[in-house]
Amino acid sequence: MYVAVKGGEAAILATHDLVAEARRGDPAVPEISVAQIREQQALACARVMNEGSLYDQDLAALALKQSQGDVIEAAFLMRAYRTTLPRFGSSEPLDTAAMAIRRRVSATYKDLPGGQVLGPTYDYTHRLFDFGLMDSPAVMAGPDPAISRRDGAGTSVSGDARVEPEHDDLKAPLDARMPRVPDILGAEGLMEAEEPPEGDPRPFDLTRDPVSFPADRDVRLQSMARGDEGFLLGLGYSVQRGFGGTHPFVGEVRVGEVAVEFVPEELGFAVDLGDVTLTECQMVNQFQGSKEVPPQFTRGYGLVFGHSERKAMSMSLVDRALKARDFGEATNYPAQQDEFVLYHADNVEAAGFVEHLKLPHYVDFQGELELIRRIRREREERIAREQGAQEQNAMPEAAE
């Protein structure tokens, strides 16, 4: 139960000033710009876009600046702004097979059509500090000081090596269209077929309609795409540790740009609206088959905004775990239960429910306080009565 709190407006306005002061920090330090956040903190912007359910790199950077880097608060700002936007319609399905590849790796095939494309990744760095990044030279830095050349060229004022990207000779043109690994397995009949539901209905929109359970796969994928990365990572890890009953292989992770097309009713043909950066993960899992289905691989799927490999992989792991019921498998673990996953993946809703405990609960607490006092009082009275009865029972024995 909540009660209205009167007064305090001046104090609240003062907190706004204090937030602005804390956000700015030391005035002697140059203020960070939205453009700098967008260009130099792109992975953080990608997370905000995913959990905020809105693809806009500038707004994601602004949200991070306004929230002092608090990703959940930034996602909340994005969602709040999203509710004010008009909705013109739905785009055409994205063709990720035609993605302009920036990065593409597979753990199932070494020599897959189109080749492995390492691209920008921290997977092969040594996780050592590059103290040269504490300076601000106008040259680019290698991502790993342990493997950057130290020949003295391009050194910063502190003496740390600052190098331009090397290996330009390896930047060969990529194939315009690279087949996805599950499609290769599917051509042999070894991969679970992905067919749209009968009639190919419009996907469910959980931002406009209430969710019911058991939830269909389109609802589950939407919820996970905007779910908390840490929560999904924990669930995906639980699946790998045996709390999910699957043995996953990374069929493919690809990152790149995909064209978004929209068909206006007055035109009747697709119009290219631009490109978005996406990360797609196809997880390959074992399945022993059944009386109706021969042994084959099954898939888990993840598709997210920006360069977000960890989120896409976690999503694909949980997606396959949530398909347990479809394959007649037991659903004994949290990652296999759609109600648990969908209700707890939303970090904006979770943060709101946890942080609402800071709001006034005076009436509730006073009720609990009075209850505790009454119980203690009754307990003390009961103990006193029992002690009195014991003393009366002991008096005749003392007289004898």
Image (cartoon, helix red, strand yellow):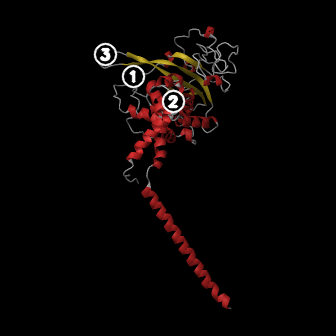
Tag 3: Cα neighbours inside 10 Å, few (<14), some, or many (≥20)? Answer: few
The answer to whether 50 is drawn above or below residue 373 in the figure is above
Q: Residue at x 69, y 14 (%)?
A: 152
User: In the displayed image of the protein, which residue is found farthest to the bottom?
Assistant: 400
Is residue 245 or residue 392 the one in the foreground? 392
Q: Residue at x 46, y 43 (%)?
A: 352
Dot 1: what SS?
Answer: loop
Cα–Cα span, label 2 and label 1 = 22 Å
Dot 3: what SS?
Answer: loop
Cα–Cα span, label 1 and label 3 = 14 Å
Q: Residue at x 56, y 26 (%)?
A: 309
Q: Quadrant of the C terminus?
A: bottom right
The answer to whether 319 is drawn above or below residue 103 in the figure is below
Q: Residue at x 38, y 46 (%)?
A: 9
Taking the image as drawn, is residue 379 in sight?
A: yes
> What is the x, y in percent for residue 179?
54, 16
> What is the x, y in percent for residue 361?
44, 54
- Quickly name the residue at label 3: 267
Tag 1: Cα neighbours inside 10 Å, few (<14), some, or many (≥20)? Answer: some
* Mark identifier at residue 181: none
Of pointers 2 and 1, the one earlier in the residue sequence: 2
Cα–Cα span, label 3 and label 2 = 35 Å
Q: CB of mark 1 within 8 Å of CB of mark 3?
A: no
The amino acid on which the numbered mark 1 sits, given as a three-letter code, is Ser
In front of the other: label 2 or label 1? Answer: 2
User: Left or right of 2: which side holds 102?
Assistant: right
Tag 2: Cα neighbours inside 10 Å, few (<14), some, or many (≥20)? Answer: many
* Mark identifier at residue 47: 2
> What is the x, y in percent for residue 225?
49, 31
The answer to whether 269 is drawn above or below residue 59 in the figure is above
User: In the displayed image of the protein, which residue is found farthest to the left?
Assistant: 266
Quadrant of residue 367 within the rendered picture: bottom left
